[in-house]
Amino acid sequence: MAKRLDYLDKAKGLLIILVVIGHIWQSGPVFNTIYAFHMPAFFVISGILLNETESYKKKFGAFLLSRLFAFGIPFIWIEILGCLTDIVRHGINLNVKGYLYNTVTMHFNDPNLWFLMDLFLIELLFFWVIRLLKKKPLIFAAAVVLFAVSFFLPTANHYISTVSGVLYYTLFFACGFCAAEWFKKLHVPACVVSIVAVLAVGLLLGREGERVLSLTTLAFVASGLCGAYAVIQIGKISFPKPINCGLIKAGMNTILIFGTHHFYYAVIGTLLGVSDYRTTPVIPGLIMLFGVAILEIPTIFVINRWVPWLAGKRKSRTLTKQ
């Protein structure tokens, strides 16, 4: 079995924790700072991992099946949980046909499934871009062009808007793939600048709004790349063993946490009387956060032990040192 890059697992673990925090408290400076970089960072790391695994060298049929297994099965049960989450929060507003309609038409009962959809499509796109262009400078140049095109597509149509999102995030994926070695090396000045840039964008500009080609949008692009670099370097820090193990385990199970945490915090939040996560009080929010953490532990254990395919895994994964 190929060696795992533990520091990338730690980086992904930190990012998925930030995702949970950002969903529980959906306003304020912490929320804005998280949203200044966390999703672009996931795409950068995914690009690095594609570069490391070289899975694009497979035949297209094998590559497609591996991506369908990795993303398709989680997509189904996350959508089902999305229906249950909606019922917990808002009551039964749709019948079974309504929920099925949302899934079939890709409107999603769990709106955060856009990430899995975009990543799936980007990986398929990159399979052909890599095969056709071969050289990383050309691959990156193509990603820049696709990124620019994303701003000129009309967003009123749901499906065209989805394509626009795919093209937009292609740039971050390409940066991870083409500049993997740079992202993995520690440059202290670059790390300091990256952290300052993320804080500045998050605190001064807030959360990125409508996607238009502007200096503000380019600032968020820079912030996303800076945040990805910083979180990867943070992943190399040797924390106390329980924290290291916890971050690595979370990073190895990001899809599981991504898919289940909405349901968990929605149930806990409903029991606590929280209905608007833009104004989540501190104490109930902390209860929700720790509640999600506690519930994820048996969830991860059970699924990895008995049904790893639900998380898109062909078998249980064993940690190895780099």
Image (tube, rainbow, N blue to C red):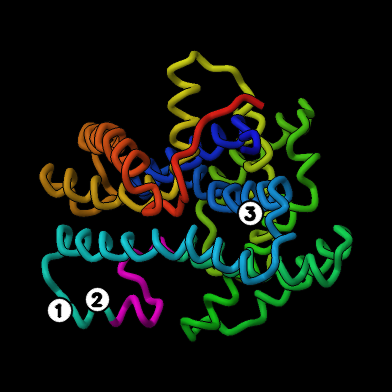
Element carrying mark 3: helix
* Image quarter in which the C terminus is found: top right
Instruction: List the single residue furthest toward the top.
Output: 240
Q: Nearer the viewer, residue 64 or 112?
A: 64
Q: Quadrant of residue 187?
A: top right
Which residue is found at the position 32% from the left and 36% from the top? Answer: 301
Which residue is found at the position 77% from the left and 70% from the top? Answer: 129
Q: Are marks 2 and 1 in contact (CB under 8 Å)?
A: yes
Q: Alpha-carbon neighbours of circle 3 within 10 Å: few (<14), some, or many (≥20)?
A: many
- Tell me if residue 219 comes above or below residue 131 in the rendering: above
* Image quarter in which the N terminus is found: top right
Element carrying mark 1: loop
Kind of residue at badge 1: Asn
Please state the horizontal and vertical placement of residue 243, each as a whole percent of the image: 45, 21
Please state the horizontal and vertical placement of residue 44, each as a whole percent of the image: 65, 50
Residue indicated by mark 3:
220
Residue indicated by mark 2:
99
Q: Quadrant of residue 100?
A: bottom left
> What whole-number distance in Å separates the C-alpha atoms at marks 1 and 3?
39 Å
Which residue is found at the position 49% from the left and 67% from the top? Answer: 117
Magenta-tinted stretch: 101-113
Task: Count the labels in the image.
Answer: 3
- Tell me if residue 192 comes above or below residue 171 in the rendering: above
Which residue is found at the position 66% from the left and 75% from the top? Answer: 151
Horizontal side, residue 9 vs residue 147: left or right: left
Kind of residue at badge 2: Tyr
> What whole-number distance in Å separates the C-alpha atoms at marks 2 and 3?
34 Å
Residue indicated by mark 1:
95
Q: Are marks 1 and 3 in contact (CB under 8 Å)?
A: no
- Tell me if residue 8 comes above or below residue 97 in the rendering: above
